[in-house]
């Protein structure tokens, strides 16, 4: 029998289990940020993210857990207009390659809006830093935990942006070696994400890829088992 799971809801009745629990309103706010987080592609042009808001979002990312406390992330803020266009060019080129690799779904993919690089208020590249091989704690058998740590930082960034009313999109459609070269990264540093940040017209009530009928999320009960893989 699979373990019981709690259904997703924005109207949860929350009772603290221990004295360390947040208040009911605080917990509802946390769960709301999680359930209303969206991967955004459409941004309001010519609107900016205030510097204090951007600082809070980056501080939230930096507060993420990391294996062996190695903090393997680097955040590169892109403020040069031509560099932004060059990054967009890399993404658009990979978009064509991805469409070709998708075969029969290639045309459907090309119809999707998959990034907002030229429209968003702020653009970042998040990367794994160089020199990671010296960090063995937690990585001897699972070296990819550095990447998992960066993913945690990006998720923190996403949730913080949502609480601030700022949209965020994670773009992974690019050739990492070419992007690393474009940004003059040292050997051993690897770009993981192009991050679009900025005010958005709205936050949809469902994931954008569901609205575009590309894919549909499945309930958590399908992903939870007990004692063994079923």
Image (cartoon, rainbow, N blue to C red):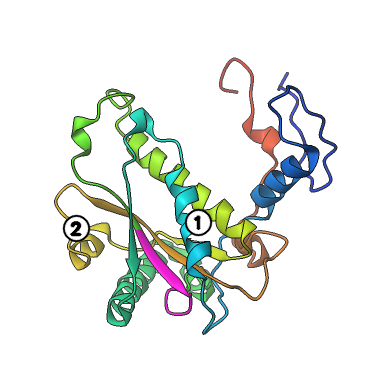
What residue is at 79 percent from the left and 48 percent from the top?
A: 10
The C terminus sits in image quarter: top right
* Residue pictured at 34% horizontal, 28% vertical: 68
- Label 1, secondary structure: give it: helix
Q: Is residue 195 visible?
A: yes
Residue 154 visible at all:
no
The quadrant where residue 175 appears: bottom left
Q: Quadrant of residue 124?
A: bottom left
Q: Residue 220, relative to residue 111: is it above or below?
A: above
In the figure, 117 relative to 30: above or below? below
Q: Nearer the viewer, residue 78 or 58?
A: 58
Query: Label 1, label 2: how many angstroms apart (C-alpha)?
Result: 23 Å
Q: Disc 2 designates what residue? A: 185
**Mark 1 or mark 2, which has the lower sequence index?**
1
Task: Work out which residue is located at the far left of the displayed protein and give it.
Answer: 187
Q: Which residue is mark 1?
A: 57
Is 133 left, or right, of 154 in this rendering?
left
- Residue 158 point in image, percent of width and height: 54, 54
Does residue 122 belong to the magenta stretch? yes
Q: Are marks 1 and 2 in contact (CB under 8 Å)?
A: no
Write down the region rendered in magenta. Answer: 117-125
Residue lying furthest top: 227
User: Quadrant location of the N terminus?
Assistant: top right
The residue shown at (29%, 31%) is 143
Q: Is residue 122 left or right of residue 69?
A: right
Q: In the rendered structure, find residue 19 and report the number of the disc placed on it.
A: none
């Amino acid at each position: 029998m699979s373990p019981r799971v709690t259904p997703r809801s924005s109207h949860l009745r929350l009772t603290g289990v221990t004295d360390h629990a947040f208040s009911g309103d605080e917990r509802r706010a946390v769960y709301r940020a999680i359930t209303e987080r969206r991967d955004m592609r459409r941004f309001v042009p010519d609107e900016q993210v205030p510097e204090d808001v951007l600082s809070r979002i980056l501080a939230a990312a930096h507060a993420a857990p990391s294996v062996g406390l190695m903090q393997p992330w680097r955040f590169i803020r892109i403020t040069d207009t031509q560099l932004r266009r060059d990054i967009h060019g890399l993404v658009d080129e990979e978009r064509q390659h991805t469409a070709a690799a998708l075969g029969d779904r290639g045309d459907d993919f090309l119809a999707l809006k998959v990034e907002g690089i030229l429209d968003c208020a702020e653009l970042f590249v998040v990367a794994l830093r160089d020199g990671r091989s010296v960090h063995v704690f937690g990585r001897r058998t699972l070296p990819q935990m550095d990447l998992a740590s960066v993913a945690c930082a990006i998720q923190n960034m996403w949730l913080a942006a949502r609480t601030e009313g700022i949209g965020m999109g994670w773009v992974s459609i690019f050739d990492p070696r070419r992007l690393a070269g474009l940004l003059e990264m040292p050997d051993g540093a690897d770009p993981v994400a192009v991050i679009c940040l900025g005010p958005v017209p709205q936050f949809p009530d469902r994931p954008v890829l569901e609205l575009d009928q590309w894919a549909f999320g499945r309930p958590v009960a399908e992903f939870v088992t007990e004692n063994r893989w079923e």
